[in-house]
Image (cartoon, coloured by chain):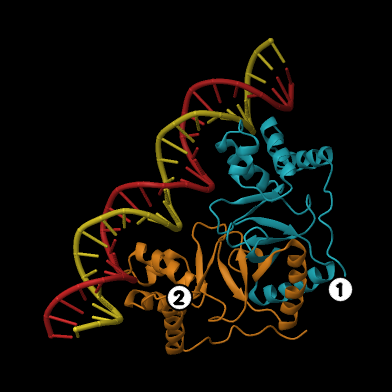
Chain colours: A cyan, B orange, C red, D yellow
Amino acid sequence: MTRGRAAGPPLSTSDLHAAVGVRLGRRAYRYTNGRRRLVDVIAAAGQPVTLPDIVAAAPDLAPSSVYRNLDVLERSGVVDRIVSNGDHAYFEFAEPLLSHHHHLICVDCGAIEDVRLDDDVEAIVDRSLAEAAGRAGFRPLRHSLDLHGHCADCA
Amino acid sequence: MTRGRAAGPPLSTSDLHAAVGVRLGRRAYRYTNGRRRLVDVIAAAGQPVTLPDIVAAAPDLAPSSVYRNLDVLERSGVVDRIVSNGDHAYFEFAEPLLSHHHHLICVDCGAIEDVRLDDDVEAIVDRSLAEAAGRAGFRPLRHSLDLHGHCADCA
DNA sequence: GAGTATAATGAGAACGAGTCTCACTAACAA
DNA sequence: TTGTTAGTGAGACTCGTTCTCATTATACTC
């Protein structure tokens, strides 16, 4: 079996902002300073982040504005919301901005880490899911494949 | 490609109650009337259910007790909690009581439906995830593979 | 069966993540 | 610059879920 794709350096900061700007523009949203800051914080984390993570990294951002802007970014296809068992939702860049990947979710501390799988595994999963979806009259958009267990810190 | 396993008739009601009783007993929990009613409601649904679903099916069960007992059942390995983007968490029987399966999650209405995949697909996914987990020092317990999209009603 | 210890129940209070409101400010267009 | 519209931030609010505590059911011992 081949190795999984590396996490890989995503877009450069300027390319990232350009891509986000395009997506916001398509929905007639403005790319304001607050949104730019938010994108910077998520990019700097390089991991799914929660609201407390964001506010800790940028204490001048108002929580209400952060939530509102995460919603705007989600609607624009810039970020994905990951709901786990923890107290807070996690946010990370959506697929086209971040290469397709999955999550290791710690059942103890709720931490979420990204992992990549082989392309051929992805293809097999997609084919199998598409078949199952077809039988149920379900129109698929994307799949999520998460591994639950104990992270290195909690094990 | 072979067909996915059928949803299949799970354990008989008496076998189900026996299995739940054993799991509760292992944790020194009592299998009370309220918990038995709760198990019956979840079994009757044959689908992941929310708290409102449960209370609608058994209005005499107190919500606070239902939440408490769902927690007890979860700790005992009887039910799994599925957190989606919807307002409520979903609950269904855990893996050994229900055969291994995955979910079709509607991004519009939040409905969750169970699907089964081929055993060989499951094996490929497990092997690939185990490899990725090993690289991260992660101790895996289980995987979850969900397909997000539009259900037959919302499409 | 009586007595005792402990777990479970249920009603309602409390909690808290996330959303909404609204007066104010920043961003774009002409 | 001026007008129009979108975005901001502080705090109130919502509502799913958890907690509290007095009461009740269960199981164990004698």
* Kind of residue sitting beneath label 1: Met
Secondary structure under the numbered disc 1 in the rendered image: loop
- Res D28 → quadrant: bottom left
Residue A11 location in percent, x, y?
A: 83, 45
Front residue of B21/B64: it is B21
Residue at the image point whose x is 64% and y is 75% from the top: A136
Answer left or right for A46 relative to A109: right
Answer left or right for A39 relative to C15: right
Front residue of B151/A74: it is A74
The tag on residue A1 is 1
Label 1 near label 2: C-beta < 8 Å? no
Residue at the image point whose x is 88% and y is 69% from the top: A2
- Foreground mark, 2 or 1, reads 1
Say few, some or many: other residues with alpha carbon within 10 Å of mark 1 (under 14 / 14 to 19 / 20 or more): few
* Kind of residue sitting beneath label 2: Ile
Query: Which residue was labeled with disc 2?
Result: B42
Residue B11 versus residue B132 in the image, above or below: below
- Res B110 → quadrant: bottom right
Say few, some or many: other residues with alpha carbon within 10 Å of mark 2 (under 14 / 14 to 19 / 20 or more): many
Chain to which mark 1 belongs: A
Question: Can residue B57 be spotted in the picture?
Answer: yes
Residue at the image point whose x is 45% and y is 72% from the top: B73
Residue D21 location in percent, x, y?
A: 25, 55
Question: Can residue A138 be spotted in the picture?
Answer: no
Residue at the image point whose x is 63% and y is 66% from the top: A149
Residue A26 location in percent, x, y?
A: 74, 42
